[in-house]
Image (spheres, rainbow, N blue to C red):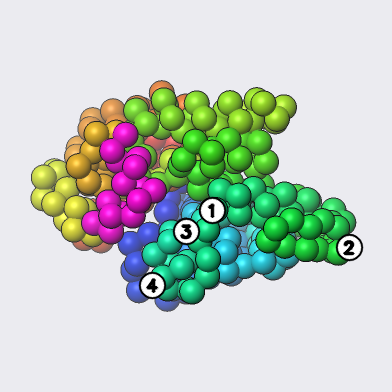
Amino acid sequence: MEIGVMLGAGGEQQTLPALVEAAREIEAAGLDSIWMANIFSFDAIGALSVIGAATSRVKLGTAVVPTYPRHPVAMAQQALTAAAASGNRFTLGIGLSHKLVIEDMFGMSYDKPASHMQEYLSLLMPLVRQEAVTAANDSYRINNVQFNAPGAEPVPVVVAALGPRMLKIAGELSDGTNTWMVGPRTMENHIVKGITAGAKSAGRPAPKVVAGVPIGLTMKPDALREQSARDLVIYGQLPSYRAMLDREGAAGPADIAVLGDENALRSGIQRYQDAGVTELNAAIVSEDEEGYERTLEFLAGLKG
């Protein structure tokens, strides 16, 4: 199982140069990947294009960019640019976002979200392979669009898929899934099982399964869990994440966080690997900067 680190998930007010420095530190530590959240700050694809030009080895990915505000043509062009900027270390992670954001905040329809994703992927996937696309569906019409991005190879695409139909669609059409707020039991019995079945039915390779998990090395796990419960409270209120927490039997997001000493973290991380996760995306939670550094050092040690 590969191990990566999330940037931007906590809504930190980091400047772009600070994000570049954080990425360089993660790369120097020997971690496999960096996943960038796309919340209400920098555009994740653009930020990773900058980070890609400032790093040399670490893999990069978005976790995740909402589909509704971006036409698949625009999304593909941005993704190919990030691929070229990073020497093809970039993975595009996309998702539906939530009704609260798309409909209530952006004023767009959130009707039939799974159908939207299926239509979106049917156009996006050939576009990121730089194939000529002429196609039409209920949401989009594209006539003879083809990109030529020198230096860019086909971009892997993973989908934030949690529900049964979304897992089937992701397995059939994309390269895998990038999850958040999913415990290890639900990961094994629901996520991995569902997306693998979808990929198999379409004759596709075994999918990438990325698990975004709050992780913190601490000698005061109870205090850090209380802090995490406050910081992550919104995720327990959004329907898609709430459904995953309910499957796991978790009262709230902090209950699936992997917190504690070295043994607790090793055990918790191993449960995800045993569940079939191919890449851990650690959203580091800590009391302070020293706690962040200790957790990053511990994760790097797992790669040794």
Residue 270 can be seen in this image: yes
- Residue at image mark 3: 97
Q: Is residue 176 left or right of residue 185?
A: right
Q: Position of residue 234 (x, y in %)?
A: 28, 59
Between disc 1 and disc 2, the foreground one is 1
Q: Secondary structure at mark 4?
A: loop
Label 4 Cα neighbours within 10 Å, binned few <14 / some 14-19 / many ≥20 = some
Q: At label 4, which amino acid type do we have?
A: Gln
Q: Which residues are magenta?
A: 232-247
Q: Position of residue 109 (x, y in %)?
A: 53, 66
Question: Does residue 84 lie above or below 1 as drawn?
Answer: below
Residue 47 can be seen in this image: no
Q: At label 2, which amino acid type do we have?
A: Asn
* Residue located at (46% from left, 40% from top): 163
Q: At label 3, which amino acid type do we have?
A: Ser
Could you give the CA–CA distance between mark 1 and mark 2, rounded to whole angstroms?
26 Å
Between disc 1 and disc 4, the foreground one is 1
* Residue located at (43% from left, 67% from top): 101
Could you give the CA–CA distance between mark 3 and mark 2, rounded to whole angstroms?
29 Å
- Residue at image mark 2: 144
Q: Secondary structure at mark 3?
A: loop
Question: Does residue 274 lie above or below 37 as drawn?
Answer: above
- Residue at image mark 1: 113
Q: Position of residue 244 (x, y in %)?
A: 35, 40
- Residue at image mark 4: 14
Between disc 4 and disc 2, the foreground one is 2
